[in-house]
Amino acid sequence: MNSVEIAVVGAGPAGLSAALAAARQGATVALIERDERLGGQLIKQTHKFFGSGRQEAGTRGFVIARRLAAAVEEEPGIEVRLASTVLGYYSDKVLYLETPDGLSRLRAERTIMATGAAERMLPFAGNDRPGVYGAGAVQTLMNVHGVRPGKRVLMVGAGNIGLIVSYQLLQARVEVAAVVEAAPFIGGYLVHAAKIRRAGVPILTGHSVKEAVGEREVQGAVVWRLDEKWHPLPGTEEPVDCDVICLATGLTPLSELMWQAGCKMVYLPELGGHVAWHDEDMRTTVEDVYVAGDSSGVEEASAAMVGGRLAGLCAAASLGHDRGVADKKAAAREELAALRAGPTGERIRTGLAGLRKAGGLG
Ligand SMILES: Cc1cc2nc3c(=O)[nH]c(=O)nc-3n(C[C@H](O)[C@H](O)[C@H](O)COP(=O)(O)OP(=O)(O)OC[C@H]3O[C@@H](n4cnc5c(N)ncnc54)[C@H](O)[C@@H]3O)c2cc1C
């Protein structure tokens, strides 16, 4: 069986940053990714990132992925294992991997789980018809494989993801019939909303999808109005001509491995659902297991990169690779606080307050 000082599970912005930080401290790292390339969600993000210049704002997501991947490939302390899925973590610090050559085991003194998040499904009649997609799947089809998902899309959700993917659909010459949003307001940045409105796409707040129309695949949709408690108002149904219903209704941390490893889990809706309890070093209740990125609470790539760096530094320091770590950790924490400041960070601050209430982040 192979062994390594630090295993990082997932090579999105959090895992790439964690691997780099740990290796630069002098640790040996195995970076394990189930996909065939490095970058996680970033590889499908063609828009320029918002946020702070310190975390690459103004750069397109896939360019950030390329930069991080190039840095990882140049780092001799990191062994990259692509097309390899971690199936389980066991108490003797052993990870089970499914690889192109079959099952294998890896013993790691520390493991950083950076597995990202999954898209939320929405219950409505016909939601299992071909033509109902998550926004991430639509992005993968268009921006990774160059395939249009259909001709005319009903977007569900007016957060940043729904608005950005709507714009990307328009750029790919796919019509967007409308964006429906259950809340009485637009959740995403108004600059994104303005762009798609200028292109003639109506954004219907206080609305949701009632059903998908079509026997074998989506051939239309019915939307209806909701009251202030998000209850549908019968009699307000309207048909929508579309062949795709795209769901951008939020993300939830991919936390199966943390459950299976025996980490204490805390339900924090503001962070997307169940997350592994962790302290300010990103360490979980299973002493050798750390978390980072969306799997530790759904935020953004900017926070994932800084949180990943912090987890990598702390995991390496716990193995004696602690050169200059105090200052580096302080700098990362400051960056995270800055990213979470202001009105846009309120949801995250509330989630983290819940984690503190459960005794975490101390
Ligand atoms: C449309 C859209 C627009 C966005 N725009 C922005 C933006 O402008 N600015 C911004 O900061 N953020 C943005 N984000 C958010 C950002 O993409 C995510 O917050 C970020 O990618 C999270 O990083 P991560 O590393 O935690 O997870 P991910 O990027 O999801 O990476 C997780 C990786 O783990 C791998 N993995 C999972 N399970 C296993 C396993 N068992 N074994 C091996 N590998 C595994 C996955 O394959 C994946 O590669 C956007 C998101 C979307 C969907």
Image (tube, rainbow, N blue to C red):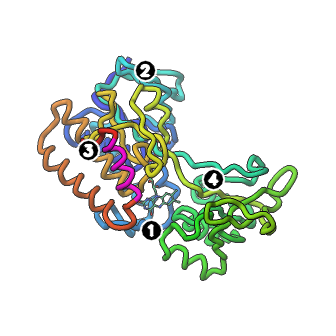
Kindly identify which residue carries mark 2. Answer: 105
Query: Which residue is painted at 83% across and 57% down in the image?
Result: 213
Q: In the image, 230: left or right of 285?
A: right
Describe the element under mark 4 as helix, strand or loop. strand
Q: Callout 4 environment at 10 Å: few (<14), some (14 to 19), or many (20+)?
A: many
Q: In the image, 213: left or right of 275?
A: right
| 3D distance between C-alphas at marks 1 and 4 | 21 Å
Disc 1 residue type? Lys
Describe the element under mark 2 as helix, strand or loop. strand
Front one among 297 and 23? 297
**The magenta stretch spans which residues?**
347-357
Describe the element under mark 3 as helix, strand or loop. helix
Kindly identify which residue carries mark 4. Answer: 134
Some atom of ligand 1 lies within 8 Å of the CB belonging to the residue at label 1? yes
Q: In the image, 132: left or right of 4?
A: right
Describe the element under mark 1 as helix, strand or loop. loop
Q: Residue furthest bottom?
A: 198
Q: Earlier in the sequence, mark 3 or mark 2?
A: 3
Q: Does residue 179 lie above or below 300 as drawn?
A: below
Expressed as whole percent of the image width and height from the top left, the position of residue 309 reads: 28, 47
Front one among 74 and 322? 322
Disc 3 residue type? Ala
Query: Which residue is painted at 38% across and 61% down in the image?
Result: 346
Q: Callout 1 environment at 10 Å: few (<14), some (14 to 19), or many (20+)?
A: some
Label 1 close to label 4 by CB (< 8 Å): no
Query: Which residue is painted at 67% across and 66% down in the image?
Result: 207
Disc 2 residue type? Arg
Kindly identify which residue carries mark 3. Answer: 21
